[in-house]
Image (cartoon, rainbow, N blue to C red):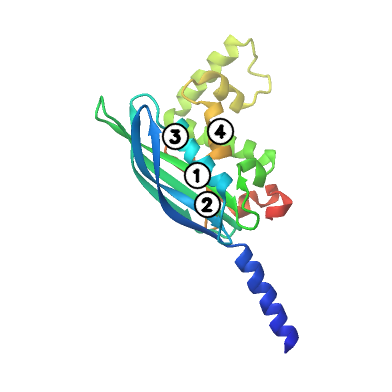
Amino acid sequence: MKKIILILLMIFSINTFSEVTIEKSRSNIVKKNRNYNLILPKIRLNGEELDEINDYIENKVSKEYMYNNFTLRDSNILKHDNNFGITSIELDFLAINENLGNYIKISNFFNIDSKTGKLLKFSDVFTKVAKEKIKIDIISRICNLIMTDDEFDKMLDEYLERNKYSKNDELDEQEVVINSLNKIKVDEIKDAIENSFYFSNDYIVIRYNGVNYRYHRNVLKEYFKKEYK
């Protein structure tokens, strides 16, 4: 009986230590001689504030997103439930251009190891192969949306002629897309994979250009780094 009680206490202790909680906190940010009173997440691990991450979030909002004539207004904090042992937080803002009267939605994602409290990037969780496969998949999906097969064939012919290739040469179609289509910003896709992602239930979701690209964990299971398998 004592052994059973001891095991239960150990399990309870582990779960308590691993708990990440999120509180909403109002932060006053001064930018361009104006004060912005925004709701930001205050993150704790086992009841203790993760000051480094909380400061990082506030600095990111202050430095990166109050740009040009846009100012941040309404904010929303969403926690995505998942089965990865990672706390995924989505922080959305409504950014308004006061000169033109239009607005855009800005989304930020913060993924935290629920055991250690470490702020994670995609490359902390997955191998390089996973990043490359998702990049190729996103490019392919974009191609399917913005061009027909005939348009792609025409682009391929132009690319072959411009680069002195023969149609008999082996050629990666992704290379054609990357080098020929200005509408696809490969560096932006890479950045989205590395930073604009979250874990939801059994899916890894990449947010690029306002679109969610979802991948089931089974599709990427062989590419998880060992500490997250």
Q: Is residue 50 above or below residue 165?
A: below
Disc 4 versus disc 2: distance between alpha carbons? 17 Å
Image disc number at residue 158: none
* Mark toward the start of the polypeptide (2 vs 3): 3
Q: Nearer the viewer, residue 174 or 90?
A: 90
Is disc 4 in contact with disc 3, using a CB cutoff of under 8 Å? no
* Mark toward the start of the polypeptide (2 vs 1): 2
Three-letter residue code for mark 2: Ser
Residue 150 in the image: state x and y as whole percent. 46, 24
* Mark toward the start of the polypeptide (4 vs 3): 3
- Structural crowding at the residue carrying mark 3, measured as other residues with C-alpha within 10 Å and reported as few (<14), some (14–19) or many (≥20): some
Q: Label 3: which residue?
A: 62
Q: Label 4: which residue?
A: 191
Residue 27 in the image: state x and y as whole percent. 40, 44
Three-letter residue code for mark 3: Ser
Three-letter residue code for mark 4: Asp
Is disc 1 in contact with disc 4, using a CB cutoff of under 8 Å? no
Image disc number at residue 109: 1
Marks 1, 4: nearer the viewer: 1
- Structural crowding at the residue carrying mark 2, measured as other residues with C-alpha within 10 Å and reported as few (<14), some (14–19) or many (≥20): many
Element carrying mark 1: strand
Three-letter residue code for mark 1: Phe
Residue drawn at the location 50% of the way across and 44% of the way down: 109
Q: Can residue 177 be seen in the rendering of this structure?
A: yes
Disc 2 versus disc 1: distance between alpha carbons? 7 Å
Q: Label 2: which residue?
A: 88
